[in-house]
Image (spheres, rainbow, N blue to C red):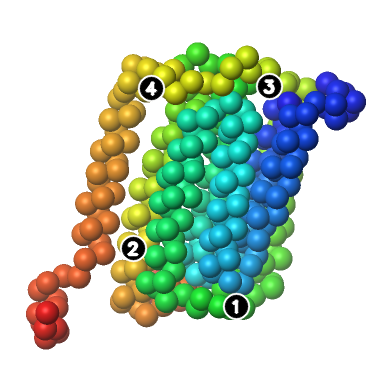
Amino acid sequence: MLINQFLLLGAALFALGVYGVLTRRNAVMVLLSVELMLAAVNINFVAFDRLIGDELAGGQIFALFIIAVAAAEVGIGLAIILLIFRNRRSANVDELDLLKL
Amino acid sequence: MDVGDWVSTPQNWVFLVIALPMLFAGFKVVQTSNVVHAVLYLVGTLGGSAALFILLGAEFVAWTVVLVYIGAVIVLFLFGIMITRAPLGFDVTLSHPVRIRVAAAVVAFVLFALVGGAMLAEFENQTIPEAADATRTVEIGLSIFDRFVIPFEVVSVVLLAALIGGIVLARRDPAEEEEAGVVR
């Protein structure tokens, strides 16, 4: 297996995630696209881990840490979106323009 | 490794069978107009990544993805969608108008071309060595609790902070409710 096939798949998924973050209006959907980007990064980490043949399995452990931090991020992110929805009756990111004059 | 070698390796066909549906599902995640469908397509992408991890011999990571992502995060997302009362059916206002979408597609494509081009130039023909055996869970456990023990502790503090922060953010303030005259 070439390393590049995994890296290109990761790059494609990451680009799709960027596209989603830029185009989605609903904040929950933006978080969903961020998850897509994190999944792409995990593929790269594990592929590089197997390429190097790390004895400590550093790439896999880093992927595990990313999964843990992503779970925390989703929990906090959804709590914040919930709070915004409670105050503004809307979870659309383009309607959250209180900082704009 | 030339094309003939690549085609005659069974793992590469398994990779294609996993990767192409993953890309399709990833595209549907950012493109579909139905929130619940988007979350379910994300299950497809994450399941595909778990399958790729097994193909690479990283079994513990694969099952962690299944348990944490598909088991917990997806359920959390579905709750989030239902609580914020996102329109559950078909909704064309879920994405920005076409003008912004075209610009975003250009940005995403340029990013992909840059990253992909750099990787093709750097890692031309490097192949992942045939795994004699998969990484065993005991190796990962020994590594985490030996070399990576401090990052592990830091991650556990992060999770605790997220737990407390989530509760503080999501609960209603009792003083505010009293002012508003909410009877419980």
Where is residue B17 drawn, in percent x and y? 74, 42
Q: Which residue is drawn at 51% across and 58% down?
A: A32
Mark 2 or 4, closer to the camera? 4
The quarter of the rendered structure image containing the C terminus of chain B is: bottom left
What is the secondary structure assignment of the residue under circle 2?
helix
Residue A100: numbered disc: none
**Which of the two discs, 3 and 2, sits closer to the camera?**
3
Instruction: Judge left or right: residue A17 versus residue A68.
Output: right
Are callouts 2 and 4 both on one chain?
no
Q: Write down the residue under mark 1.
A: B90
**Distance from the alpha carbon under mark 3 to that under mark 2:** 42 Å
Spatial CA span between label 4 and label 1: 45 Å
Q: Which chain carries label 4?
A: B
Chain letter for the residue marked with disc 2 in the picture: A
Amino acid bearing label 1? Phe
Residue B107 falls in image quadrant: bottom right
Q: Badge 4 is on which residue?
A: B141
- Where residue B150 appears, x then y in whole percent? 30, 25
- Residue beneath label 3, please? B128
Horizontal and vertical percent position of residue A69: 39, 42
Picture coordinates of residue B62, whole percent (x, y): 52, 36
Mark 4 or 3: the one toward you: 4
> Which secondary structure, mark 3?
loop
